[in-house]
Amino acid sequence: MLQNIDILKASIPGCEDLIWENETTLRTIVRAKIGPVKARFKGKIILSNINPPKSYTISGEGQGGVSGFAKGKADVTLTETPEGCELSYSASANFGGKLAQMGSRLLNSVAKKMADDFFDGFVTQVTNSKT
């Protein structure tokens, strides 16, 4: 499911387009509001450190024109449980340009919310696909 393009597209808030470029890279367009700045980011999502079915790293970078750029990464770990599977992650993000002027406290909370929204959406998509 972590490589299912339909699940990923539906899980990424504001995702307008998501296309496989090769086996580990997707091109994307995402519309996002980061603090007071609204931007349309064109970029890539790269899957690396792939160790099925245990873990992988998902990283992305996007250019938002005059708004600046965003880069992020999440290390994802899957652990088998009696109920099925537990997904855990550790995420980080960097911003540049106009976005970076908002201050690290706001940007850190926005990055955490964006990661949480993605993984919450992912869990919802996976749950719905099984019913």
Image (cartoon, helix red, strand yellow):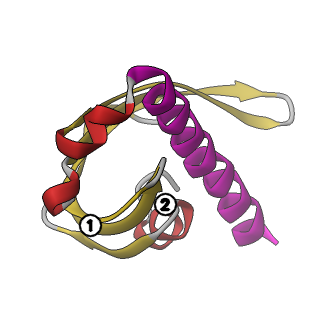
Residue 128 falls in which quadrant of the image?
A: bottom right
Please tell me which residue lies in front, 116 or 98: 98
Residue 113 falls in which quadrant of the image?
A: top right
Please tell me which residue lies in front, 50 or 95: 95
Say above or below: 116 vs 120. Answer: above
Residue at 47% x, 35% y is 111
Cα–Cα span, label 2 and label 1: 10 Å
Q: Is residue 23 visible?
A: no
Residue at 47% x, 68% y is 14
Say above or below: 92 vs 21. Answer: above
Residue 57: image x %, image y %? 34, 32
For this orientation, the residue located farthest to the right is: 83
Q: Which mark is residue 12?
A: 2
Q: Which stretch is magenta? A: 104-131
> Magenta-highlighted stretch: main secondary structure?
helix
Dot 2 falls on a residue whose secondary structure is loop
Q: Which residue is mark 1?
A: 28
**Quarter of the rendering occupied by the C terminus:** bottom right
Tag 2–tag 1 contact (CB < 8 Å): yes
Check residue 121 for magenta coloring: yes
Dot 1 falls on a residue whose secondary structure is strand
Sequence order check, earlier mark of 2 and 1: 2
Residue 10: image x %, image y %? 54, 70
Q: Crowdedness of circle 1 by 10 Å Cα count: few (<14), some, many (20+)?
A: many
Say above or below: 82 vs 1. Answer: above
Residue at 15% x, 58% y is 66
